Image: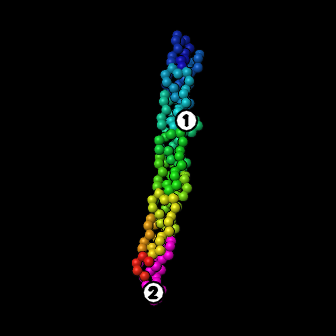
Amino acid sequence: GTWSGLEAGECTRCLAGTRSDAGAARCDISEPGTYSSIGDATCTPCEPGRWSFAGKSGCEICPLGTRTAPGGLCITCEVGRFNPDGSASCSQCEAGKFGSARAGACTSCPAGTYSSSAGSSSCDICAAGLFSEESSVSCSRCPPGFYSDAGSGDCLICEPGRISGLGSPSCFLCSTGTWSKQGS
């Protein structure tokens, strides 16, 4: 943790962010992912979830949506994963949610969409005749007397004189000589 130059009468302590071996003529800069205090002989690795550039006296928490990588630097979470607190690893988004790159949190799938598996990078759109609420893991079929367009968050009721079956994408006119009330 000290060094001595030519014709020096005493050893000088290495600055923070540097280190030296016994008998050194200079101090070496700490590697990325490590740190040192004044006079340290070695550099200390950053704790998981923390990082540093070369020559630093301390480590910082990785930003949201990143994790530590070998070498002590922070890297972006993969799509479908998130990291809310800069910890050492990224977690998978649960079904019904998705994550974009560098996500600090997962986003709920909006109504009319779904995500059936964990770790999704996007949500799928419900087909016509189906609907879903926010954070859904699947789409549900519209009941008889109702219909929906693709990407719907709810079903619409059929007008009087029109009918539909379970999961129908549209309502159909009653045939000649028949009738129906609204929602049949």
Look at the numbered disc 1 and give the secondary structure of its residue: loop
Q: Is residue 121 visible?
A: no
**Could you tell me residue 114's position as x and y percent?**
50, 60
Identity of the residue drawn at 47% across and 41% down:
85
Q: Position of residue 39 (x, y in %)?
A: 51, 20
Q: Range of the magenta residues?
A: 159-179
Residue projecting furthest to the bottom:
177
In the rendered view of the protein, which quadrant contains the N terminus? top right
Q: Nearer the viewer, residue 20 or 4?
A: 20
- The numbered disc on residue 178 is 2
Residue 127's x, y, as percent? 52, 68
Q: Residue at x 50, y 44 (%)?
A: 83
Q: Amino acid at mark 2?
A: Thr
Q: Quick check: 104 above or below 37?
A: below
Can you say whether 169 is above or below 42 in the image?
Answer: below
Distance of label 2 from label 1 (alpha carbons): 75 Å
Residue 84 is covered by the magenta coloring: no
Residue at left 54%, top 58%? 116
Please say if 78 is above or below 22: below
Q: Callout 1: few (<14), some (14-19), or many (20+) C-alpha neighbours within 10 Å?
A: many
In front: label 2 or label 1: 2
Front in this rendered view, residue 87 or 58: 87
Which kind of residue does numbered mark 1 sit on?
Gly
Q: Is residue 175 visible?
A: yes
Per the picture, the main secondary structure of the magenta-coloured stretch is loop
Q: Residue beneath label 1, please? A: 72
- Of 81 and 58, nearer the camera is 81
